[in-house]
Amino acid sequence: MQAVILGGGKGTRLATTGPKPLVEVGGKPFLRYLLAELRRFGIVDIVVLTGPFADAYRARLGDGSQFGVRLTYVAEPDPAGTGGALTYAARHLAPEFLLLNGDSFFDINLVDLMTRTFSPGWLIGLALREVEDVARYGAVGLDGDKVTAFGEKAVAGPGIINAGIYRLRREAVAELGPPPVSLEKDTLPRLVARGQVRGVVYPGRFIDIGVPDDLARARTLMPSWERRPAAFLDRDGVLNRDHGYVHKSEDFEWLPGAREAVKRLNDAGYLAIVVSNQAGIARGLYATEDVEKLHRWINGELAKTGAHMDAFYYCPHHPTEGIGKYRRVCDCRKPAPGMLLHAIREWPIESPASFMIGDKDIDMQAAAAAGIRGIHFSGGNLDALIGAILASQARRGQ
């Protein structure tokens, strides 16, 4: 999946002459938080619609490689509006893509939005949010998942708003017309009237830095929002039935509730991370490429249900049965905590609220050595177990 970021808005009300997404928040440009979130969901092909600020973006973000993404910048020869900016980017657009406002953050399961089924008539899907006061944003009307009104001015009070994340089919760009044109004011109301826009309401944390008060809030909130609890999951025996050295998709058998459990974690805002001993590599039974291919397949299967694993860590070593370079004592093979500690270094993990689920004593020992709560899985439905864990942590305020 590709993402396109609307980044050409000027930060006039924020006392800056540059674009709003490059305003400093928590010691880095606000856009960095969006890039990290997209990468977390496996979205690394990102087009930034820069308006007149292409040079500023290149100077601050380069080609994106240092953040694990690929950035393409599309400038506007003249002010074109949000819809017009998309028309200039037409040749770069994938058949389906996410479109994000570069000056807002909405903490949702992006894979869930991406994998909602669109009937042939739909062109645009919106991530929506309930707020206490719609006056600043304009209200969205919803009948089931069909958007019936968009951007209507409303008196102060609770309601549903557009939260600035869209899923678009490329055919929607043909509906924009010549620039300058506004996606929100010109195109979306017309497509809503034709019944071609759907919406999904999500409860995630939301902030828009378009006004000084909310920018000040973002500078306090975003660094804390960036940190998340993680659920570390052993693979064989937790996600799938352990047939012994599973390394092919045709041998991978999901355990009951496994896919639903991962989605539950995604929806709750947890990082979902696999940590798995893979001694079959050490023994020469299969290669690292086989494991990585299987893990890509796992995420492809999870995506069908709106879920994903944030990361996979595996140990290819064995201290006595390994062949060649894989025969060694290492700090990553459980019960050593190396894989968990590596993940904690690489991800903004809130360790006190994190936990490890495994089916063996070595999983519990690795969790204890990493300072993570260990939970033994002795079979049954993984989703039921995860649900009980999250409910318990919510009661404790974690």
Image: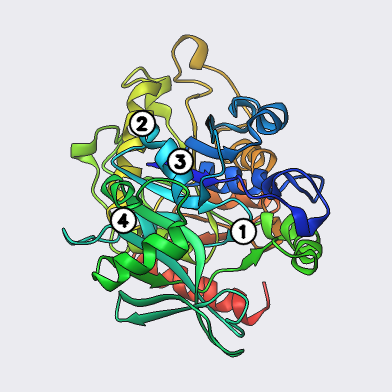
Could you tell me how far apart the alpha carbons at marks 2 and 4 are, in whole angstroms? 24 Å
**Which residue does the image show at 18% across and 38% down from the upper left?**
250
Quadrant that contains the N terminus:
top left
Residue at x-position 72% and y-position 58%: 222
Question: Where residue 125 appears, x then y in whole percent?
Answer: 35, 62
| Mark closest to the chain's N terminus, 2 or 1 | 2
Q: How many marks?
A: 4
Say what amino acid the circle numbered 1 marks: Ser
- Read off the residue under disc 2: 91
Q: Quadrant of residue 347?
A: top right
Q: Which residue is mark 3?
A: 43
Q: Secondary structure at mark 1?
A: strand
* Three-letter code for the amino acid on which mark 4 is drawn: Thr
Q: Is residue 13 left or right of residue 164?
A: right
Q: Earlier in the sequence, mark 3 or mark 1?
A: 3
Secondary structure category for the residue under label 3: loop
Residue 122 in percent (x, y) is at 24, 61
**What is the three-letter code of the residue carrying label 3?**
Ile
Q: Which mark is residue 313?
A: none
The residue labelled by disc 4 is 115
Q: Which element type, helix, strand or loop, lies under badge 2?
A: helix
Camera-near label (2 vs 3) is 2
Specify the label residue 104 is tagged with.
1
Label 4 – label 3 distance at C-alpha: 14 Å
Q: Determine crowd level at label 2: few under 14, some 14-19, many 20+ residues with C-alpha closer than 10 A.
A: few
Residue 222 position (above or below residue 45): below
What's the distance in space between the residues labelled 4 and 1, CA to CA?
A: 22 Å
The mark nearer the N terminus, 4 or 3, is 3
